[in-house]
Amino acid sequence: MNIHNVKLTVSAVSEKQYPKTEMPEIAFVGRSNVGKSSLINKLLNRKSLARVSQTPGKTVTINFYNIDDTVHLVDLPGYGYAARSQSEIKKWGAMIENYLRDREQLIKTVLLVDSRHAPTKDDCTMIDWIRAYDDSGVIVVATKTDKLKKSQIEKNLELIWETLELCEDDVLVPFSTKDDEGKFTVWDIINMLLSADAKSLEE
Ligand code: GTP
Ligand code: MG
């Protein structure tokens, strides 16, 4: 995809602030610190459009990035960040759940997991959530593969595949911001989703 214009439409803390556009949305979810904001920057070749930090819990709003008035890439707050208060966890949990459940423009939710570790209980809960609202196959991105030895990557991908009980309709993409691993595959997937969506609107 040749990108010309990228802008942050809104950092939303409530439904009222979500963009009023009809543009399709693709959301990225995953544990805090897994690399959601970094992946969006990498896809867009921007260094710091989406805020990235060493400190987990950086993204606390739902951020909608408008790509050439064609699609919104949506950066969701991460889960599993222990230092948040219970009331914050509740508030954000509800915000994320409501978005994933009710948002009509949302055409796909992409789950990010850390390629170095087995998926957590929270990751398994999240994939169940995604499957509950979309039965057309899950897209999972395994981040930070540059931190693994080549020989380890394959083993860990197998572990992720098994733990998340992925099947032939699902896709697992290794990804790193340090090189171009996964970048073109994720773009191919986004473009496929967008053309399938456009087709379904024509029918
Ligand atoms: P929250 O906003 O807290 O939910 O986190 P996030 O999922 O948006 O993670 P973020 O993109 O802020 O990245 C967290 C940390 O991981 C940062 O220090 C990034 O530089 C680092 N990181 C992300 N992706 C990669 C990667 O592919 N390789 C390496 N080595 N580091 C990465
Ligand atoms: Mg973030």
Image (spheres, rainbow, N blue to C red):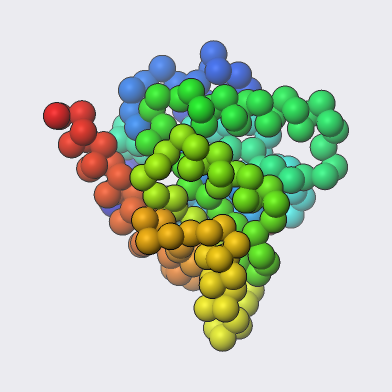
Q: Is residue 67 above or below residue 110?
A: above
Q: Is residue 17 left or right of residue 58?
A: left
Q: Is residue 145 above or below residue 197?
A: below
Q: Is residue 49 left or right of residue 117?
A: left
**Position of residue 102 measured from the top left corner of the image (x, y, whole percent):** 48, 23
Looking at the image, the residue that sits furthest to the left is 203
**Position of residue 170 measured from the top left corner of the image (x, y, whole percent):** 41, 56
Q: Is residue 88 visible?
A: yes
Pick whichever, 123 or 65, lies toward us.
123
Q: Is residue 117 left or right of residue 161?
A: right
Looking at the image, the residue that sits furthest to the bottom is 151
Pick whichever, 38 or 158, lies toward us.
158
**Position of residue 55 measured from the top left corner of the image (x, y, whole percent):** 77, 50
Q: Residue at x 56, y 44 (%)?
A: 128
**Position of residue 39 measured from the top left corner of the image (x, y, whole percent):** 52, 54
Q: Is residue 182 left or right of residue 69?
A: right
Q: Residue at x 52, y 65 (%)?
A: 161
Q: Quadrant of residue 7?
A: top left
Pick whichever, 183 or 202, lies toward us.
202
Q: Is residue 53 visible?
A: no
Number of callouts in the render? 0
Q: Is residue 154 above or below residue 14?
A: below
Q: Residue at x 64, y 74 (%)?
A: 147
Q: Residue at x 56, y 86 (%)?
A: 151
Q: Quadrant of residue 115?
A: bottom right
The image quadrant where one finds the C terminus is: top left
